[in-house]
Amino acid sequence: MYTLYYLPDACSLATLTVLLELDQQVTLINKTGINNFREINPVGSVPVLVDGEKTLVEGAAILLQLLQQKPNQLFPQDEDAQQQATQNIMFANATMHPAYGRLFFIAQNLPEGDARNAAFSAAAGAINQLWQFVETQLQDKNFLGGDLVSAADIMLTVYSRWGEHFPVEIETGPRTVAMLTSVLGRPTFQRALTMEAEG
Ligand SMILES: N[C@@H](CCC(=O)N[C@@H](CS)C(=O)NCC(=O)O)C(=O)O
């Protein structure tokens, strides 16, 4: 049984969805209800996954740990495919997630006005370039790894929900929209949303 510290609709939603895809039992703790969260993760971020005596942090590292425990459909066994799947997870976590992170930073730190609007516009442009890259990757397949959904697809689907909270136009191509719609419709993703809402 795992314990997952989360924030609703944050990147920890991908961790939860992957846990459900792997048929794991998990208890949720909303970070906002914890006074001393930095004693659990000094960096202050979710996800944090507690596995018995171990406290795991950093979303990509947590996912790779979970995916490598035993064979599963989210993570291929073939060496080349596995390398590509790892690369896709890192693209999502270390490239797309920080690109969206700029939107949160601008909203929290820049006063209303031209500079804020220009910063939003530049951040959206960078995000749209990354979605264009995803669209190119999906030209010959339904998901980043091929026919089967992967952890990276789930991560990207979580991030794709963030743009609507900001005054930006986020553009995703038709194949990307199909991938995101498919992941969003998975019972695990819907169950994860319900679990977060119930707390
Ligand atoms: N590199 C970290 C970044 C995680 C991160 O930025 N998490 C955000 C939510 S998506 C967070 O916890 N922010 C702190 C907060 O909102 O209080 C990881 O991948 O785990």
Image (cartoon, rainbow, N blue to C red):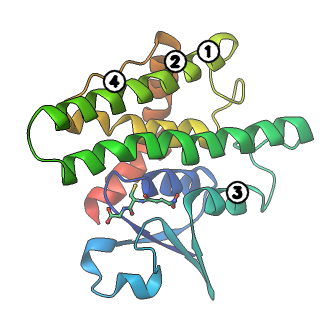
Cα gap from disc 2 to disc 1, whole angstroms: 6 Å
In the image: residue 96, left or right of residue 75: left
Residue at (27, 22) in percent of width and height: 169
Which amino acid type is shown beneath numbered disc 4?
Ile
* Image coords of residue 64 (percent x, y): 70, 57
Mark yes or no: residue 73 visible: no
Disc 2 residue lies near ligand 1 with CB under 8 A: no
Q: Bin the neighbour count of mark 1 within 10 Å (Cα to Cα): few under 14, some 14-19, many 20 and up.
A: some
Q: Bin the neighbour count of mark 2 within 10 Å (Cα to Cα): few under 14, some 14-19, many 20 and up.
A: some
Disc 1 residue lies near ligand 1 with CB under 8 A: no
Q: Which quadrant of the figure contains the N terminus?
A: bottom right
Label 3 sits on residue? 64
**Could you say which disc has been placed on residue 198 in the image?**
none
Residue nearer the viewer, 149 or 130: 130
* Image coords of residue 98 (percent x, y): 46, 46
Q: Nearer the viewer, mark 3 or mark 4?
A: 4
Q: Bin the neighbour count of mark 3 within 10 Å (Cα to Cα): few under 14, some 14-19, many 20 and up.
A: some
In the image: residue 133, left or right of residue 114: right
